[in-house]
């Protein structure tokens, strides 16, 4: 079949039908519109061209998608993208708050370990005699507080502590050391509690990170859809 010249765009084309006068459905629609305009009005050529361009925007793409639909779908995707970005921002705020909680818990642990617990551990590591004289020997401690230069005369010796006939000093040391251990264990329990809270918060942060990753994947999907719709619109 011989080639023809399109009556709308003047391009050469091989017609599929013998009565074809235009190279495509778009050109045929534009040509028919212009023909109708020429018959029914006194419009000048620039107006006819403008009207033809407007008509082209309404031509169906691939038979079922028009420009109004494309614009609507693009706006729908953009709305979803705004919602996703908003959700990501909210999750990022929660992540920041949880990260601040972790820092707070870590600070509490450090305060305990370098503060009261450290003092108790140091006290617990003293010998029985040093423990008694520095914390239980009320006679010595009272005189020392008064500034008595002879307060050292109130100090007990190792033999005093191990005297089988006077077990009270030994018993008081053992009770005091037991109390120290209980206090240390209490601090260890506090530290363990903070550590468990840190683990829980980190788990939450990991979940939030996974959620953000999922949302970002959705965002990329909608961005690709918008780009596709815009490309189709430009091709109209």
Image (cartoon, rainbow, N blue to C red):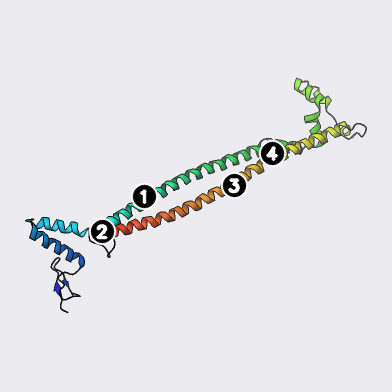
**What percent of the width, then of the height, locates residue 2?**
15, 78
- Label pair 2/4, CB-CB below 8 angstroms: no
Instruction: Check disc 3: other Cα within 10 Å, few if <14, some if 14-19, many if 20+.
Output: some
Which of 108/225 is in front?
A: 225
Badge 3 or badge 4: first in the primary sequence: 4
Tell me if label 1 and label 2 are in contact, CB under 8 Å.
no
Q: Which residue is mark 4?
A: 187
Q: Nearer the viewer, mark 1 or mark 4?
A: 1
Residue under label 3, please give it: 200
Nearest to viewer (mark 2 / mark 4): 2
Cα–Cα gap, marks 1 and 4: 52 Å
The mark found on residue 79 in the picture is 1
Q: Which quadrant of the figure has residue 70?
A: bottom left
In this rendering, position of residue 75 left or right of residue 134: left
Q: Is residue 98 above or below residue 23?
A: above
Give the mark nearer the N terminus: 1 vs 4.
1
| Residue farthest bottom in this picture | 1
Mark closest to the chain's N terminus, 2 or 4: 4
Residue 143 horizontal side relative to residue 191, left or right: right
Is residue 130 visible to the viewer in this orientation of the structure?
no
Helix, strand or loop status at disc 3: helix
The residue located at (50%, 53%) in the rendering is 210
Q: CA distance from mark 2 to mark 4?
A: 69 Å
């Amino acid at each position: 079949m011989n080639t023809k010249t399109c009556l709308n765009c003047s391009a050469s084309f091989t017609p599929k039908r013998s009565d074809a006068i235009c190279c495509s459905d778009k050109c045929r629609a534009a040509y028919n519109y212009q023909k109708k305009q020429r018959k029914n009005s006194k419009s000048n050529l620039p107006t006819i061209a403008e009207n033809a361009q407007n008509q082209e925007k309404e031509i169906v793409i691939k038979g079922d998608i028009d420009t109004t639909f494309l614009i609507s779908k693009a706006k729908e995707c953009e709305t979803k993208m705004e919602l996703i970005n908003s959700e990501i921002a909210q999750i990022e705020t929660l992540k920041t708050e949880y990260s601040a909680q972790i820092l707070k818990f870590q600070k509490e642990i450090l305060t305990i370990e370098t503060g009261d617990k450290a003092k108790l551990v140091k006290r617990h590591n003293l010998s029985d005699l040093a423990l008694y004289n520095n914390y239980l020997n009320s006679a010595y401690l009272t005189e020392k507080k008064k500034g008595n230069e002879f307060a050292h005369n109130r100090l007990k010796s190792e033999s005093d502590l191990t005297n089988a006939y006077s077990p009270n000093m030994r018993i008081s040391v053992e009770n005091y050391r037991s109390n120290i251990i209980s206090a240390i264990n209490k601090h260890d329990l506090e530290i363990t509690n903070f550590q468990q809270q840190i683990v829980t918060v980190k788990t939450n942060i990991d979940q939030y990170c996974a959620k953000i990753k999922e949302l970002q994947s959705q965002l990329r999907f909608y961005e690709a859809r918008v780009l596709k719709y815009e490309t189709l619109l430009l091709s109209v």
